[in-house]
Image: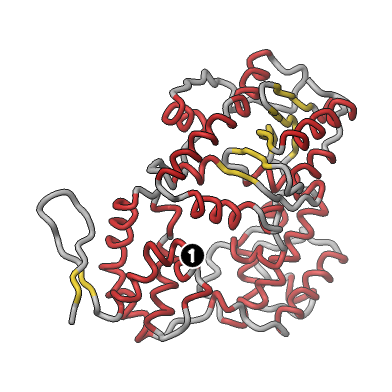
Amino acid sequence: MVVDATGVDEITAAARATGRCALDTEFLWEKSYAPQLCLVQVAVGETIWLVDPLEGAPLEPLGELIANASVQKLMHAPSADLIAFGLHFGSVPANVYDTQVAAGFVGLTASASLDRLLDAVLKVCLNHNETFSDWSRRPLKATQLEYAADDVRYLAPLVDELERRLAERSRDGWAHAEIQRRFCTSEAAGGDPERAYRKVQRRGKLSPQAQAVLVDVAAWREQLARRRDQPSGWVMKDPTLVEIARAAPRTVEDLQQIRGLGKSLGERESGELLAAVARGLEREPPAIERSVPQRVARQVDAVATLAVPMARIRCQDADLAPELVANRADLDRFLEAVVAGEDPSALPLGQGWRKELLGDILIRLVAGEISLSLNQTAPFLNVEERC
């Protein structure tokens, strides 16, 4: 157990000397804007430290460790952990390794829990019964401490085995690039408020101008939620946010006509919201929300009938978790660009290993150069060339 700065300094020194460490956190995130860190587990070699910030251990040095590119952080599904360090300490993650993503490149699902992954890869069976513990209560029980330690105890051997399997398949470059893209960015550290609009439900039916207003209104909500330390949905619900973007109120009286807004905003906050609307009215609509011509949409719908099973079969043949390659929105957006004659190279399926695996063959499918056919034996992609 570590409850002071001296213990934390020992951890960071060991991690820097070794060049890698396993790291995990226990947090609460029901009533706050940022995850509230209650415990941080770190393993270097055979040593495991449980860092308790509620008992006085400072976490800023661990935030610096997260951002230290010379130390590899071995983690499992680290999104929330990285957001916590990003929002609390401004840590932009570097040199993170995610076992969940890596598993998707060696024929395993890319969404497995740590328990399932350890069982599948190392044949280690954990007895975990503290998943829904209240980690803010002290003292921690012995079973909680064991549970927390187990979350980092086996990460190093798990990574070593995953790396062996990746190298065997020549997939290590693919996996490392995908982990870098997902977790070693400023967005992984809590993101830019101006990207918050992408999470707003039912924004798709807004006009381009209303979508532009939504960018600034959603950013305002994020900033106010952080100031209040509340979940953004507590500050304002998505339907109300969408209605404000649609109506583009100019005055406090206009705001009061918005359903669901009520009297939840003070004078200062109302002024900030109106200023956000005004900025949005001057903004160019976000390109990601552009409308698709009906002719293109019809052709995309038609080709997607073949593209969807093609993608699934390509992933199966390659022993890749499909969720790593593309979701339906990624697929549709790529097909829209190809059908419309646009350059798709800025899209995920137009880059790197995704292009090699699927993007190139989708381009040929749209061009009518290949077709799909059934095979009477095991399912695999049978590509027929067309002269």
Quadrant in the rendering for residue 262: bottom right
Of residues 9 and 45, the one drawn nearer to the viewer in this rendering: 45
Q: Amino acid at mark 1?
A: Gly
Give the x, y percent position of residue 269: 83, 64
Give the x, y percent position of residue 308: 31, 63
- Determine whether the residue tagged by mark 1 lies in a helix, strand or loop: helix
Of residues 34 and 25, the one drawn nearer to the viewer in this rendering: 25
Give the colouring mode of the picture.
secondary structure
From the image, which quarter does the N terminus lie in?
Answer: top right
From the image, which quarter does the C terminus lie in?
Answer: bottom left
Residue drawn 24% across the image and 79% down it: 368
The residue furthest top is 142
Residue drawn 79% across the image and 38% down it: 62
Q: Is residue 126 visible?
A: yes
Of residues 176 and 254, the one drawn nearer to the viewer in this rendering: 176
Quadrant in the rendering for residue 241: bottom right
Q: Is residue 33 visible?
A: no
As drawn, 131 above or below 233? above
Of residues 119 and 195, the one drawn nearer to the viewer in this rendering: 119
As drawn, 8 above or below 73? above
Residue receiving disc 1: 352
As drawn, 20 above or below 201? above
Give the x, y percent position of residue 57: 85, 29
**Is 23 displayed left or right of 369 in the figure?**
right
Residue drawn 79% across the image and 78% down it: 251
Residue drawn 87% across the image and 65% down it: 268
Give the x, y percent position of residue 202: 53, 66
As drawn, 9 above or below 258? above
For the residue carrying disc 1, how many other residues have a C-alpha within 10 Å: few (<14), some (14-19), or many (20+)?
some
